[in-house]
Image: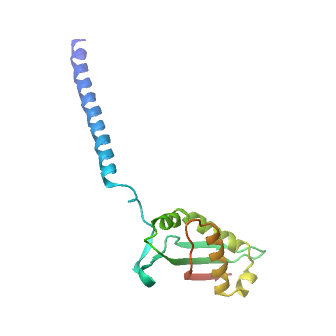
Amino acid sequence: MKKAQGVLPVVYRVLLVLVVLLGLCIVCGTVYALLRGPGRGTAPKEAGFPAVSGEKVFTGIDRIRAATGGDAPAAVILSLTFPYDPGDRFFAEELSAKVGDFRRTAVEYFASLTAGDLARLKESEIKAELLRRYNAGLRLGSIELLYFNEFMIIE
């Protein structure tokens, strides 16, 4: 019994030291975050080369795989990018936040077409429709131009 009573004060001291260390970690992390300042979160994923006149190329959408509608659906593989002004921080943040919406919009667009419809469309018409749909969901700016890095229709 005496041995158990001698151990309890040691356990309490160890627990007290752990609580103090945890509190110090929280305080130090808070001070670091405050000194670091706002607006330094993740930047939009971009290519390593500048576009025209200081613009960057947004590549955060990555590769999209979609299926067309109809009785005999075709697979569509698409990778698209577009230039944007990295100086407009709010628009750049909106673009990053909308990546899921951009992907969903493209999948829905291709699902609304049959393989035959898609084969008859020109690439410029597909770009124009995707651009219209993307800009309809943006509030802080607009995308002016879309580039297809990859565009395949597999029937």
At x 66% / y 72%, what residue is drawn? 133
Residue 140 against residue 78 in the figure, above or below? above
Residue 69 vs residue 61: left or right? right
Color scheme of the displayed model: rainbow
Q: Residue 32 in the image: state x and y as whole percent.
A: 30, 49
Rendered image quadrant of residue 121: bottom right
Identity of the residue furthest to the top in this view: 1
Q: Which of 23 and 17 is in front in this view?
A: 23
Q: Which of 38 and 150 is in front in this view?
A: 38
At x 68% / y 74%, what residue is drawn? 110
Q: Which of 10 and 52 is in front in this view?
A: 52
Quadrant holding the N terminus: top left
At x 57% / y 64%, what residue is drawn? 100
Q: Residue 76 in the image: state x and y as whole percent.
A: 64, 77
Residue 14 vs residue 130: left or right? left
At x 24% / y 15%, what residue is drawn? 5
Rendered image quadrant of residue 127: bottom right
Residue 70 vs residue 101: left or right? right
Q: Is residue 106 visible?
A: no
Q: Residue 42 in the image: state x and y as whole percent.
A: 42, 62
How many numbered discs, if any? 0
Q: Can residue 100 be seen in this view?
A: yes
Identity of the residue furthest to the right in this view: 71
Quadrant holding the C terminus: bottom right
Rendered image quadrant of residue 86: bottom left
Q: Residue 71 in the image: state x and y as whole percent.
A: 78, 74
